[in-house]
Image (cartoon, rainbow, N blue to C red):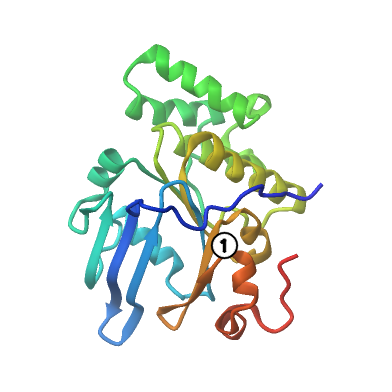
Amino acid sequence: MSVIKKFRITKIKNSKPLISLKKISLSFQKNHLILDNINLDISKGQVIGLLGPNGAGKSSMMNLITGALKPSFGNIFIKNEDITQYPIYTRTKKFRISLCPQIGGYFADLSAEDNLKAVGEILIKDKKLRKLKIEELISKFELDAVRKVEAKHLSGGFKRRLTISMSLLGEPEILLMDEPLAALDPQTIQMLQNIIIKLQSEYNLTILITDHQARDLLVVCDKALILANSKIVAEGTPNELMKNVNAAKYYFGENFKFK
């Protein structure tokens, strides 16, 4: 059964954006421009997809939001507050930002349960609350059968479930997901798509996702944007992107179909 997103949040009237990137540029060297004058507003509760060829700056944009990178020019705002100079830990704690990395994100030699406990001890001081939260996540992400299995021995799908559950321990408001659908079988991709849709509806999360599985990514997005040549060359709902000349020119090609 295919994944069906029942609604798409395309815009929120009379609401200030939760995340704003204003005139953001990023260069790793003087002649190596990654992002050039990027302006982007993301509303609370939206699922936004980032698409583009390799090296387009998708992961860099996420790292700018977390604070792992600093822009060469421009400013980043969350809840209308300029966070450009804030370190990672301040952004994480004050604005409840969480990241699911493309690779890793867990302690390989610890079991699934002990991974959750390790992060939980940092984020949740109350022992009873911590235990309840861990058990809730183990149940929600169907990790009970592998709770005692070391993370390095888990399948790709279970590793993704584990890293997502770990990212939710701090009850984030903003979740960044770097290629969560990569290198997975179709059934696991469908399972993760359903998880992402439920995260939006049940947790009211604002989610930013990047992935090369374009068709699978567009299924769960409210809006998506395409990065190419250091700029946003196209943006809109999945259906709008299918009609966008630049989307086809810079990323999809002529024969790509969303449905």
Residue 25: x and y, percent? Answer: 29, 75
Residue 254: x and y, percent? Answer: 70, 84
Q: Is residue 147 visible?
A: no
For mark 1, what is the residue? 211
Q: Who is closer to the viewer here, 33 or 245?
A: 245
Q: Residue at x 41, y 79 (%)?
A: 231
The image quadrant of residue 249 is bottom right
Could you tell me the amino acid type at mark 1? Asp
Residue 86: x and y, percent? Answer: 19, 52
In the image, taking residue 210 as reference, residue 4 lies left or right, namely right
Q: Tell me how many marks there are.
A: 1
Q: Is residue 232 visible?
A: yes
Q: Residue at x 62, y 61 (%)?
A: 218
Decide: is 51 above or below 125.
below
In the image, taking residue 174 as reference, residue 209 lies left or right, namely right
In the image, taking residue 256 as reference, residue 72 lies left or right, namely left
Quadrant location of the C terminus in the rendered image: bottom right
Q: Residue at x 50, y 48 (%)?
A: 104
Secondary element type, mark 1: loop
Q: Residue at x 47, y 29 (%)?
A: 116
Give the residue furthest to the left.
Answer: 85
Decide: is 119 above or below 235.
above
Q: Who is closer to the viewer here, 104 or 194?
A: 194
